[in-house]
Amino acid sequence: MPCFLSRSCAVFYSKKRKKKMMQAGLLLLCSLLVLPTAGAVDRKILVRVKPQYPPIAKRLKLTGTVMLTVVVEPSGVVKEVNTIMGEKILVEAARQAVKQWKFVSTSVQSFEDVELEFPVDAAP
């Protein structure tokens, strides 16, 4: 059973903890080196698919803005789409469209911020 009362035990446990934290930090650093990425670099979109306005959103006259973060592979293919904000019904339509987009190729994976409008005039 560990001794938490004596100073020597406390020093031993803090050194052990510090070593584990350093190992975790090194592991994180190595993983960042293995997967080179660029921040939001504003890559040009080659193929842009317009989102389908969901029929239920039209009936409800639901409008608004959807904001997404897109992970783009070096080849320009969309790897992942993450939601930042937006109405749930509109978000799904936006995500489905953005998954089909194609970006200009680069040497690294990147993150792109995308903002899509579902305007009032599109919802009769």
Image (cartoon, helix red, strand yellow):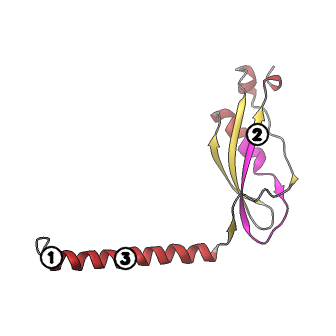
Taking depth in this image into account, of 50 and 30 the one nearest to the observer is 30
Mark 1, residue position: 7
Q: Which mark is residue 20?
A: 3
Say which residue appears at 39% left-offset and 73% top-offset.
21
Pointer 1 with pointer 3, Cβ within 8 A: no
Query: How far from the left and from the top, in percent, is residue 9?
Result: 17, 77
Q: Which residue carries the number 2 mark? A: 116
Q: Which mark is residue 64?
A: none
Q: Position of residue 61 (x, y in %)?
A: 73, 21
Which quadrant is home to the N terminus? bottom left
Q: CA distance from mark 2 to mark 1?
A: 59 Å
Tell me the magenta residue range. 94-115
Residue 94 placed where, x, y %?
A: 73, 41
Residue that protrudes farthest toward the right in the picture: 46
Mark with earlier residue (2, 3): 3
Q: Is residue 102 highlighted in magenta?
A: yes
Left or right placement of residue 60 versus residue 8 in this view? right
- Residue at position x 80%, y 51% in the image: 100
Amino acid under disc 1 = Arg
Amino acid, disc 2: Leu
The amino acid pointed to by label 3 is Lys
Question: Depth-wise, is mark 2 or mark 1 nearer the camera?
Answer: 1
